[in-house]
Image (spheres, rainbow, N blue to C red):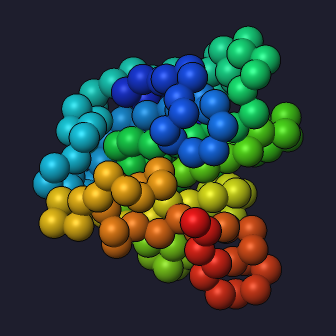
Amino acid sequence: MDSIRIAGVVTDSIVDGPGVRYTIFTQGCSHKCPGCHNPQTHDYNGGILVSIEDIIKDIESFKYIKGVTFSGGEPFDQPKPLAAFIDKLKSKGYHILAFSGYTFEQLSKNPEKFEALKKIDVLIDGKFDINLKSLDLKFRGSGNQRMIDVQETLKTNQITEMD
């Protein structure tokens, strides 16, 4: 896969993971959580189809960027291009964080989605729940969402949450 459908990017985010990050908002979302702060990303036909290589060139133009975040929309609704994109970023040494409305367990049960999941460093999982909304959570919007160290979780076969 050499392209992915996105809603847009933020080239210098400090709220989408540790450090200054390049955030990619994927287009299309099956969850449509009430109170979502990116409802414009829900339509699978919206946004634009972009070359993964073009986005990587843009990321590399920001020498201070060490991490890339995939947000949405729902990144794992495009599992094959997501996995290919992550492969290329990891080969260049970038830290990868992804937000997903799916839980770690749900992603693990789907072979295509798991292929992308197993390549990332940190997953923030679970649907946004407006009833559990909190401004006090690091990088998360609602109390049901977990920040998971994916590589440690895969090593130990136990969910390893981070603060």
Q: Position of residue 116 (x, y in %)?
A: 62, 57
Quadrant in the picture for the C terminus: bottom right
Quadrant in the picture for the N terminus: top right
Q: What is the quadrant of residue 39 in the picture? A: top left
Q: Is residue 50 left or right of residue 121?
A: left
Work out whether residue 147 or residue 9 is closer to the camera in this orientation and state it: 147
Q: Is residue 4 above or below residue 80?
A: above
Q: Residue at x 27, y 37 (%)?
A: 38
Q: Is residue 91 left or right of residue 43?
A: right
- Inspect this view and state whether residue 128 appears: no
Q: Is residue 38 above or below residue 53?
A: below
Work out whether residue 42 or residue 130 is closer to the camera in this orientation and state it: 130
Q: Residue at x 74, y 68 (%)?
A: 151
Q: Is residue 40 left or right of residue 136?
A: left
Q: Residue at x 42, y 23 (%)?
A: 8
Q: Position of residue 67 (x, y in %)?
A: 69, 37
Q: Position of residue 143 (x, y in %)?
A: 33, 68
Most extreme residue toward the front is: 136
Work out whether residue 76 or residue 163 is closer to the camera in this orientation and state it: 163
Q: Position of residue 47 (x, y in %)?
A: 33, 24
Q: Residue at x 16, y 49 (%)?
A: 35
Q: What is the quadrant of residue 59 in the picture? A: top right
Q: Is residue 136 above or below residue 146?
A: above
